[in-house]
Each structure stands twice: as structure tokens, then as C-alpha cells.
Image: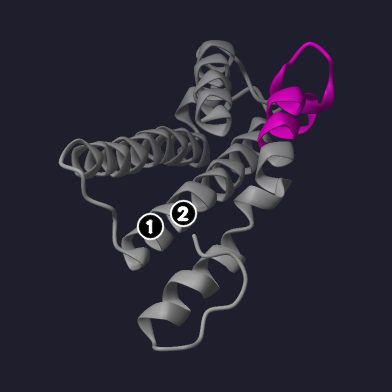
Amino acid sequence: MVPVGALKGMVDQFVEISRNRLSGRGDKVAEDPAVSLAVAQALITVEDVKSAMHRSFATLYDWIEKGNLAHWQTRRQYRFQGSYGPKRCADAASELYRVFGGSVIFADFPFGRQLNDILAVRSHFTNHYQLHANTWVGDLMGLQVKGMPV
């Protein structure tokens, strides 16, 4: 998933650049609790989204190998999971961008390009997580689901 790789790259570069960087006040950026939290949240987002996708695909492949089809609710759940990952990545990337400080806008830092890549994927129709939430949860609540079946 593109946003996961872009976020991981952003975290890696953020850490490398920030390791010995000083803030505008002369403080070590690595000692800033907001930086620690943003990096930790980004890393756990990468792991959570990857784990959810691997788990979903493993389950689907297992069903296929056994000649079974996934239940509609499960398929809708997995579709929501897949569309919600880019949103989570965008949120984490935006926070990294914010805590880096004002110099993040300069071309020396790749974060703007990486954030834009993540936002572009998040904006794609297939990642319209609200639609997929409505479809999945509407089905769970007994509503007549309109639109895409999965």
C-alpha cells in the first residue's frame, strides 16, 4: 500500500534528519515529547495498517484455496479496512509534518512531497472510507445497502 511505504519513508527520513537537529530555540529536537509522540504514532500506524492488510489477505487466500467465498459482511469489513489505512497514514504524516517545524516547507526536506503522495492516494475514490463504512455497518444494522456490493 503506497501510503504505508510513503509514511515509513517519511518516518525514516524524519528520524535521520532530526537525530542531531536543533530547534529554533537551540533545543535538541530529539528531546521534544511532541516529536517522540508523532514518530511513535507514525510507526505504530505503519505496523497496524500493514498487519491488518496482511491478516485480511491471508484469510481471503485461505478461503479461496478451500473453495469458499467470503461472506458479504467480511468482504465489506476488509474493504473498509483497506480504505481506512490511507486516512490513518495521512493523519500520522500530517502530524510529523507539523512537529518538524516551519523549515519543513523548504525543498531540502522531502516531507512535503511524501505528504502530498499520501494525500493523493487518500483522495482516490477507492479510499472513500465513509462510503465503505456506510456499506459495511449499514449491512450489520439491517439496512438495505445501496451502491457497491463490496
The secondary element bearing badge 1 is classed as helix
Res. 68 visible in picture: yes
Q: Mark 1–mark 2 contact, CB under 8 Å?
A: yes
Answer left or right for 82 relative to 57: right
Residue 104 falls inside the magenta stretch: yes
x, y (%) of residue 76? Answer: 42, 62
Q: Nearer the viewer, residue 63 or 43?
A: 63
Magenta-colored span: 101-118
Answer left or right for 10 relative to 67: right
Residue at the image position 47 percent from the left and 47 percent from the top: 82
The image shows residue 104, relative to residue 83, as above or below, that is above
Identified by mark 2, the residue type is Arg
x, y (%) of residue 120? Answer: 74, 38
Q: Residues within 10 Å of mark 1 (few under 14, many from 20)?
A: some
Q: Residues within 10 Å of mark 2 (few under 14, many from 20)?
A: many
Q: In the displayed orientation, state which residue is furthest to the right.
A: 106
Residue at the image position 29 percent from the left and 63 percent from the top: 71
Identified by mark 1, the residue type is Arg
x, y (%) of residue 129? Answer: 57, 59
Examine the residues drawn in magenta and state their main secondary structure. helix
Residue 128 falls inside the magenta stretch: no
Q: Which mark is residue 75?
A: 1
Quadrant in which residue 128 is drawn? bottom right
- Which residue was labeled with disc 2? 79
